[in-house]
Image (tube, grey):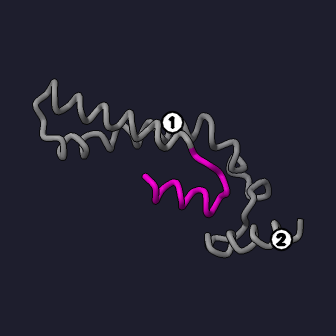
Amino acid sequence: MSIGLALIFGVMRVVNFAQGDFMMLGMYLTYYYAVAGGIDPLLGAFLTLPPFFLLGLIVHRARAHASDGGGDPSRRGCQHPDVSACARDHECDDAML
């Protein structure tokens, strides 16, 4: 959890509160698998991955895709394929302000 938050905040300078919400929903689904279905919690965690991948994909397409330029390269904040180069560019932009 903390690695994901640190990575997103460190690279994009965005605090992603939805990550914790999705994590809690995934834990509740895994708990439901264990209690109601008698499935081992570790196996339940693996069974939780596909539906939450699809849920994340749907949420990204519906909400977050517009904030990253909507697929138009001219609207994106970073033109570099290398994430570290993008982070360096944003650091330089911040220093210029």
Task: Say left or right for 65 vs 48.
Answer: right
Residue beneath the point at 25% across and 43% down: 45
Q: Which residues are magenta?
A: 1-16
The answer to which quarter of the image holds residue 92 is: bottom right
Task: Say left or right for 29 vs 96.
Answer: left
The answer to which quarter of the image holds residue 54 is: top left
Which residue type carries mark 1? Ile
Q: Is residue 4 above or below residue 50?
A: below
Could you say whether the residue bearing mark 2 is in a helix, strand or loop?
helix
The answer to which quarter of the image holds residue 24 is: top left
Residue pushed farthest left?
38
Q: Position of residue 27 (x, y in %)?
A: 31, 37
Q: Is residue 2 magenta?
A: yes
Who is closer to the viewer here, 67 or 1?
A: 1
Q: Position of residue 18 (x, y in %)?
A: 53, 39
Task: Kindly report the distance in space between the C-alpha atoms of the residues bearing marks 1 and 2.
Answer: 36 Å
Q: Is residue 22 magenta?
A: no
Residue beneath the point at 21% across and 40% down: 44
Residue beneath the point at 55% across and 41% down: 17
Residue identified by numbered label 2 = 95
Q: Is residue 90 above or below residue 26?
A: below
Task: State the count of labels.
Answer: 2
* Disc number for residue 58: 1
Could you say whether the residue bearing mark 1 is in a helix, strand or loop?
helix
Counting residues from the start of the chain, the first of labels 1 and 2 encountered is 1
Which residue type carries mark 2? Ala
Task: Say left or right for 96 vs 40.
Answer: right
